[in-house]
Amino acid sequence: MKKITVISGKGGTGKTTVVANLSYLFNDLVLADCDVDAPNLHLLLNPKNEESKVFKSNKLAVKDQSKCIDCGICYDVCRFNAVDPISYDIDSYKCEGCGVCVAMCPEDALSLKLLDTGMIYNSTTRFGPMVHANLKIGSDNSGKLVSEVREKATKKAEQLNKEVVLIDGSPGIGCPVISSITGVDLVLFVTEPSKSGFSDLKRVAQVIKHFNIPALAVINKYDINEKISEKIEEYLINEEIELVGKISFSSDIVDYLRNAELIVEKDKDNKVSQEIKSIWKKVDKRLQKLN
Amino acid sequence: MKITVLSGKGGTGKTTVSVNLALSLDNVQLLDADVEEPNSQYFLHPNFDKEESIYRKIPKIDQEKCTSCRKCVDFCEYNALAMMIDEVLVFPEICHSCGGCKLICPENAITETDRELGVLKHATNKYNVDFWQGELNIGEESSVPVIEALKKKADPNKDIIIDAQPGTTCPTIEAVVDSDYGILVTEPTPFGLSDLKLAAELMDELKIPYGVIINRAEEDSNYIIEEFCNENDIDILLKIPFKRKYAKLYSEGIPFVLKEKELKNDLQKVFRQIGSVVNEENHSN
């Protein structure tokens, strides 16, 4: 079984659209939506939910006002500015649940409380099982929820003897992205030919290099700016990242997306569908070679 | 006035709105708080003239003093410390720099060293926008301290526009939390709508007034966003139409307002509208 994560650095380059269309082509796989902050894959694949579970991992310091003597030690030791300098109340957005105030409080007035981080779902799509989640708004620790989604999907694939786990990642280079690529066999970058798209690709590619994971790339909407596309291609060659295909800019792909449909399924002869199919073949070949 | 531009979904046009709004106003400061992928720079042709490192603290164990009592390992909520036979190992990437291990150690065997987390950069540019950006170092996980430091650069004598990170977690909250107003940028797709709902929920929770800009607006599909905004009494501030020309300008890092005066007028109008909402808000409080 092989795991592949699709990421981009920059948001809105087409990760989820590519993942959904690839899942049709793979046809028999396990899907994981690790963009728990803004999950969208379910909107395209319309999964049937089989099990929902509350996921708890965030901790928050809570104060027992009756024991508090207003000594202010909690304020002094908190490095996250989570304690109000006057009321010594705890700001739940700022608190990172480190427990320093709890350990230092002379009156035992503080304790750490386990909080809901979000919901985690086991579902089925017409292409196989899907694990996805919803991070609670304003929640910390999305990394742990991402890990949980990734691990659940992996277990599912092992149980059912599936060859491929396809993971939709999140934008950026921080905590959730790092969690979504931990232990995967391959990364697929979906980039776009804009100055910002290119710059973000370079940043996220450095992260992948740091973790020593082989990577492939797709240039989406490549004909919006062919000059920058060429520069990206040069960069990919230098970095030894295989370009597995380019997708044309087309309003068709957006029209299908608006109807929650997959272009590769509904319009097989469309130029974009052909392009995605060719990408899938190369990705599949690379996954086979990993064995 | 301090305005933060944010969105649930990435790639909807936060940077487009932030930069073009900044270029439409006088006496303005732009703070790029999307520190994982700061992109405003590509539209401003900045000459970076100042740079400051942001550090965080990482524990250092004095193995001579350490008695392998494990108290620090047991204390750490993030599993950033581990016991290898009788030695404590530190994993700096996952350490949150809370300082707890140092306080807890009964032998005073823990000191702290600085580790660079990111940088702040200031730039001048021909557009007269006072510009600061935060940048998270590659391989680092927590953006919040960089955003906190960036916000300290806010000039109280200027109008401030903050370009936030997408999403609804800590980095986005840190960017928006003390703003007077939030501009939520979205696009008329099911993804855009779903993520707009999350961003709106966040703003309701933070009790910050907000309005919506629909980017890549198209007549026949705007309704999904409009319906949601109407039902929830959310102002639609502006629609930026979908044009291939815009996609091309964006790709080359050319701000749209330089090519279309009308958009500049529209953004000035949006700014005035926000001003009156914020004024009313201040009066009613």
Image (cartoon, rainbow, N blue to C red):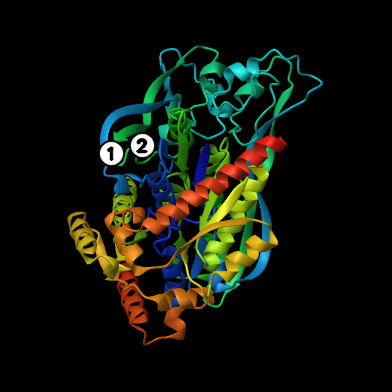
Instruction: Name the residue rendered at 50%, 63% in the picture.
Output: B187
Residue placed most toward the observer, B270 or A175: B270
Q: Which disc number belongs to residue B131?
A: 2
Q: Secondary structure at mark 2?
A: strand
Counting from the top left corner in percent of width and height, residue B132 is at 37, 35
Q: Residue at x 69, y 36 (%)?
A: B283
- Decide if residue A101 is in sight here: yes
Residue A135 rendering spot, x and y as whole percentages: 60, 51
- Give the distance between the C-alpha atoms of the residues marked 1 and 2, in whole angstroms: 8 Å
Q: Nearer the viewer, residue B92 or A251?
A: A251
Image position of B116 (left or right of A145):
left
| Tag of residue B82 | none
| Observer-nearest of A291 and A266 | A266
Give the amino acid type for the residue marked by disc 2 in the picture: Phe
Chain ID, mark 2: B
Which chain hosts label 1?
B
Residue extending farthest to the right is A66
Label 1 secondary element: loop
Q: Are marks 1 and 2 in contact (CB under 8 Å)?
A: yes
Against A98, residue A44 (above or below) is below
Which badge, 1 or 2, comes first in the chain's sequence?
1
Q: Nearer the viewer, residue B262 or B5?
A: B262
In the picture of the structure, the residue carrying the numbered disc 1 is: B125
